[in-house]
Structures are given as structure tokens and as C-alpha cells.
Image: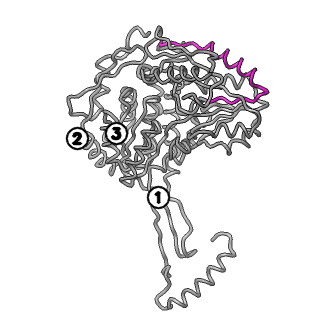
Amino acid sequence: MPAAVPISSDRITQLTRQIRSTSAETRTTTSPLTGRPLAEVPVSSLEDVDDAFDAARAAQVAWAATPIARRQRAFLRLHDLVLRHQDELLDLIQLESGKSRAHAFDEVAHLALTARYYARRMKRQLAPSRRNGAIPGLTSVHVNQVPKGVVGIIAPWNYPLTMALSDGLPAIAAGNAVVLKPDSQSPLIALAGVELLRKAGIPTDVWQVVSGAGSVVGTAIIEQADYICFTGSTATGTLVAKQAAERLVSCSLELGGKNPMIVLPGADVDRAAAGAVTACFSSAGQLCVSIERLYVHDSLYDAFREAFVERVRSLSIGPSLDWDADIGSLVSAAQLETTAKHVDDAIANGASVLVGGRARPDLGPFFYEPTVLEGVTAAAECFADETFGPLVSLYRFGDVEEAVALANAGEYGLNASIWGPVPDAREIAPRIKAGTVNINEGFSATFGSVDAPMGGMRSSGTGRRQGPEGLLRYTEPQSVGVQRLVPVGGPDFLSAKIFARVMTVALALLRRTRRA
């Protein structure tokens, strides 16, 4: 275990001062690496949430009028600050989430990528677009992208840096303000990110932070925000959607997944096995897009199973704050309990453990070995339910039609992975009901491509982060039309009947052109 927490009480106080809180209530957070207390975090009252929205609304007006060039420069400074301060960021991610340092770096890289991407693209994505008018030559129409106002972001614990900031960056790029509620298990890393955001030049009141239980503070955010961005479970996301719908405000929801990986005939077995290790066990499987179902063609199954199990068996597990461990800890007792329960239940229903299958309290309170199961039946909980832990089930398939049907089974549709000849995989990809499909990769090809939209189908959510879609979700399209010379309804000197005849002839002529 880490010999000492590499963050002082003074530094913790400095970070937590960014939370808007006037109550005397605090909450103690603990590190999953050790189970020991980490920080006393102020809890926001409902009045604090009101004050956060009041300040954000006041600041948003001036921020929306800020030249885009200034926003761009702030985002590029943030990019540089994130990379420059990565050592502390990595420590905090590990201390609060328990993940290995290599997996923690994924968050640092993703945040830097997101900041740079929107710095380079926001001007183009927000520029007014020209559309066809009602009467060619006489009607001109432009569409503006108007900020929604104040965006409420309810962030998860599993990617506590990038999910807290990367979803908010396009919101402020578009001229909105943000009220953020980090997850109660991992607030410090989000606060460190917000601190860098302010150092980069984003005005303090444009990005507010509140803290507390989702049922209290999260609900208060939903009751006031002009748009809601939520990442979490499908059950909670459904409640968020209902609450947003009651106020007629939009929301984007990235929810659960039971993500499949297909290994086609012709796939490179060793490469697929190596890729599956990363796809299944990054952040100890606590990743919305990680793979929990592996479908391998009969012709490759035995060779793949041997190569995959051997690679999983060689993974190192540990709590160190260096780069030595391949796999870190689960985040909480609840995640450990779910993983152990799913493994035990699958075994009770006839499954076999090929590797792993044990908790490791000798390493820390919430460690569990990367586990591969075979022979999981529909009676087992982990057959269709998301584990969100270091557990994957291995299955055979006979032909492509069967593989597609198996991959599409269930209620989720977040991410999928296909390994094999690229033309074959590309042909199959549109048939998979998932918001992202990675070919010869597990999830990073789409997750790391910030210009590409990312989100779920079916019970895995609605809306998209990243790309132009990730920015434009925070705007209202506003059409502005200018009419010249002749009114759309016709000039005063023509009767309605004659104008209708003129328009009939005009519409017939326009039908013969390609532009109108």
C-alpha cells in the first residue's frame, strides 16, 4: 500500500474551498487503495445550489459575449496546464478511484485532447450557417447557435477527472455557464481540474461547484439547469430524464452497458487476445465502454482462450502510486460485492473460472482479481446484467449471423468491438446496436477520437459527447430570416388567388432545378 498520502491537509483545504458551501456539514471520503480517510469535504445546502445558479446566470451573460478567440486561448492554456500538472492529477485520480497509474493517465490525456480539440474547432462549429430561403434570391436565412444558459453536470466516480471537465468544456465553449456536482467519492480530482480551468482564464463564476448527495444536490441541479448532462447508471439516468422532461429541458445521458466483443474468422489471435485484456480490464473494468462479453468463432476459440487466459494471468495487481501495477482497485465495497456476487452466482449456475475469481484483501480492501468465466448461462446474473468490474464471460459462435444476434441481445447498446479482417468488420459494424463500434480495438479508437460522437443506443442512454454533436447539444438553433422586396405571402397588389397561381408556376419551375 502507499506509504503515505502524497497530498497535504493544506492542499486539500485549498481544493475544497472551491465548493460553494455555507453549511457546517462535511463528508469524509476514503481512498479505495487503503480504506483510510482521505479528506473532509464540505457539503452544499439547497441554498448554496440556489446561489451557485444565481452567480452562474449572472456570469453567463458576460461570458456569452466574450470573443471566441479569448475562449480559444483559455482552452489551449488549459491543455498545457493539465499536462504540466499531471503528477498531482495522477496521484489524486489513483487515491480517489483506485485505478492503476497507466489507466489514470488515460484521463489526463483525454482532458488535454478535449481542450485542444474545442480550442481549434469551436469557432467553426459555432459559426452561423446559411440555409435556403423560402423565395430564392429574396429570402436569406441564417441559423445561429445560441447558448442554452446554465448547464448542470452530474459527474461519475469512475472517470472523475475527464467526466467532470470534458463534458463541461464544450458547454462553456458555446457560451454557457456550468454548475458541476462531482461524485461524492471523488471530488478532489474534479476540484483540481476546476482550479486549472480558472488558472487558464475561465472566470470563477462561469464554473460553479457544489457537493452533496445526488438525491439532494443532484435533484436541485435538475430543477434549475437549462440542460442536464448526466453519466451514471441506467436506473438513475431514467429518473434524471423524467425530472428533466417535467421541466421541458433537454438532457444527455451516458448510462450502462454490457458491451460485446466479436472475434471473427481470420482475426490475429494474439493481437485480439492482447486487445481484449485492455478492453476488459482497464480501470478494473469500471468503465462504461469496457467489454464484458467475448464472442469467439469456433475455429479460433481454443487458441484465443489459451492466449487470453495466459495474458490475464500475467497481469500485476497492486495499490502503488507508480507505474508498476497493471490493475488497480475497485472503488468501493459495493463494487467489490457486485463483482464477487456475479462470479459466485455464475459458478452456482454452472460456469467455470478460467482465471481469477478471488478478492485480494491482502492488497487492499476492494481488490479483486481479473476474472474470466466460461460456460455462463442465461440463469446467471452476469449473463445480461452489467457487472462494472474485472469480470468477462467467454462464448463461442458458429457464424456471423449468430455473432450479430448475440452481440445485440439484451437492453444495452453503448460500445462494441470487432476483431478480424477490416472489410468484414466494417460490413458487420452497422448491424451492431451500439453507439460506438471499434474495429481491431476495444474502445480507445472511438473514445480517443474527440472529433467523433460518443454515446449509447437503447438503455445505454441518449445524446452524444465529443465532436460537433458534443458542443451543439448545449445550444439552441435559432433561425434568422431576412425578406427583401416581395413578402413571402405575396405583394399587396395581387389577390390571394392570383398569388397562389404564380406560386404554383414558380414551384413547378423550382422542381426542375437542383439547388432549390
Please tell me whether residue 321 belongs to the stretch shown in magenta: no
**Front residue (pair 314, 451):** 314
Q: Which mark is residue 477?
A: 1
First in residue order: circle 2 vs circle 1? 2
Which residue is identified by label 3?
Answer: 218
**How crowded is the residue under tag 1: few (<14 C-alpha within 10 Å), some, or many (20+)?**
some
Figure quadrant of the N terminus: top left
Q: Position of residue 293 (x, y in %)?
A: 62, 30
* CA gap, disc 2 and disc 1: 33 Å
Q: Going 55% across and 86% down the picture, which residue do you hit?
A: 500
In the image, which is nearer the foreground, mark 2 or mark 1? 2
Q: Secondary structure at mark 1?
A: strand
First in sequence, mark 2 or 3: give its number: 2
Q: Which residue is mark 2?
A: 47
User: What range is drawn magenta here?
Assistant: 293-319
Secondary structure under tag 3 reads helix
